[in-house]
Image: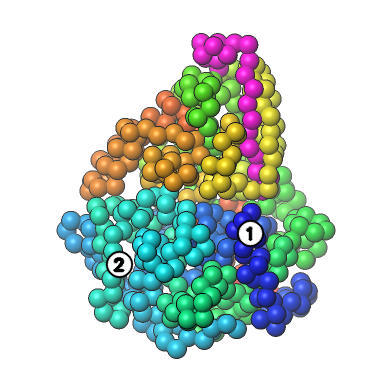
Amino acid sequence: MKAFIQLTLSLCGLTLLAGCGEGLDHSKIRQTGFVYCGQGGPDSFNPQLVDSGITSETLSPQVFDTLLTLDPDNFKPVANLATSWSVNKEGTVYIFNLRKNVSFQTTPWFSPTRPLNAQDVVFSFQRIIDDSHPYHNVGGGFYPWFSGIDFQNLLTDVQAISPYQVRFTLSRPDNTFLSNIATSHAVIHSAEYARGLTIADDKTRIDSHPVGTGPFYLYDYQVNDLIRLKRHKNYWRGQPKMSQIVFDISHRGTGTLAKLLRNECDVLNSPLSSQIPTIKQQKNIKLMVKPAMNISFIAVNTTNPALNDPRVRKALNYAINRQNILESVYYGTGSQAYSVLPPNSWAYLKDNVQIRYDRNYAIALMKAAGFDKGLELTMSVPLEPRAYNPSPRKTAELIQANFADIGITLNLLTDDRFDRSNVANNQHVDLYLTGWIANTGDPDNFLRPLLSCDSKKVGLNVSSWCNADFDFLLDLALEVDKPRYRLNLYKQAQNILNEEFPVIPLSHGMQFQAFDSSLKGFKVSPFNVQPFDTVERIK
């Protein structure tokens, strides 16, 4: 809430500065752009400062660029702002060659005098890792996604060795480094813009009034109403086809599906599974379906004395009828989870022995743990639909009924969204119905941010679970150079999770996007939304 208030205050003058504030006139927008709906508002416009949500998942690829991106088919890093790179034989020093003539956006609050160079890359990463950097503490000084993977202790230095060459020095070899800097969190800011803000004593504007090299720039933000992006005419890949994109983040009037059906919205992100049949019946709406790297799970607060007993956590796991959830919530569009990793992960280990529905065994485990007379628990339930869980409330109610069958009273605590960086303030909550959408195709991107001891230290491990053997396997997997060795290590790590159950895997969802048939050019990825520079209206 604090971050939201800060953002509101810092952006209250943005509409006046941009000279707009015209509201949401869909017919007018359709002439030059499109309306995108289905997500909530931002807490910040800097993807470095958020863990998930519209900023990192959707806005980041429009406003910013990264050194590398991930191939949507094989998940390997490919060139982007960096055209090539090399690494020493120890795997600890990377040198990136930067693309030339990449223009930063000209906005109502900034006009660049030079293209992107090495100083911008140094600024963007030093801000994250150097706590003495003049911008490190701007916006709170907490970089949750990077903290979850221990990035600050991995990357020790970033230096410009020429105007278009940058050297990254690591404290140890890390097989995931290239993939991690290809995510939508690892964006490149303008060092020139930052220097101007420092002189003006207005550093916070770097996060509320962003400047990047992406295909669109922020033009208008009206709190709880809309976000308007406009075309970056000097975009290095070529001028985007649409001149504007409007994100409808309001909750007024009808629901998002009704807006789509009434032509008040052109693109609907992650429609509910129950809405899919209706969408398929519409001749003027197309439905894009793609496999997603995600997992829906229950995080178990192991600081609760009862839940610190693995027998109780196992009982909760065996009590859940996942097939019932799939039928009632996903309407045939999801799949049962047998691991924290999704089936399209190269390290996936299916365990249908430990992860199954067995009510009698669950009752026996509760009795063995001394809770044969029952147990009362609370569970936090976010109301916002996500690709991994299209209807959290319905899922929670089904789990509530399952737990009642083994003598557990489950009280549901609802909220709009789940933010794992706020877990430290909610230690009274026993269970969290949540999930994870991967940023890379590497298994480490699931296991480390969610369950490592380092993640627990910075308050992002929702289960407050720490296992030295588990961490050892993850760390070793980062350094070994043989894929088969890494595979074996990740399988051992999954076996530990399916013995301990700090999180209870539920299901995997598909990524859906519905859009008006007059639009074409959407790019597909199993991770975040892709840039909209190729989207155009054909009729």
Q: Amino acid at mark 2?
A: Val
Q: For mark 2, what is the residue?
A: 158
Report the front residue among 79 and 20.
20
Q: Is residue 324 above or below residue 165?
A: above
Asked where in the image residue 9 lies, by quadrant, the reply is: bottom right
Say whether disc 1 or disc 2 marks the residue closer to the N-terminus: 1
Asked where in the image residue 259 lies, by quadrant, the reply is: bottom right
Compared across the picture, whether 16 is left or right of 91 comes to right
Q: Amino acid at mark 1?
A: Phe
Which residue of the protein is positioned furthest toward the right in this rendering?
253
Q: Position of residue 215 (x, y in %)?
A: 53, 76
Question: Gap between marks 1 and 2, in whole Å?
Answer: 31 Å
Q: Crowding near pointer 2: few (<14 within 10 Å), some, many (20+)? A: many
Q: Is residue 144 magenta?
A: no
Secondary structure category for the residue under label 1: helix
Q: Is residue 64 above or below residue 391?
A: below
At horizontal 33% and vertical 33% (from top left) the residue drawn is 468
Residue 63 visible in image: no
In magenta, the rendered stretch is: 362-384
Compared across the picture, whether 147 is left or right of 2 comes to left
Q: For mark 1, what is the residue?
A: 4
At horizontal 47% and vertical 50% (from top left) the residue drawn is 438
Report the front residue among 108 and 341.
108
Q: How many marks?
A: 2
Q: Is residue 376 magenta?
A: yes
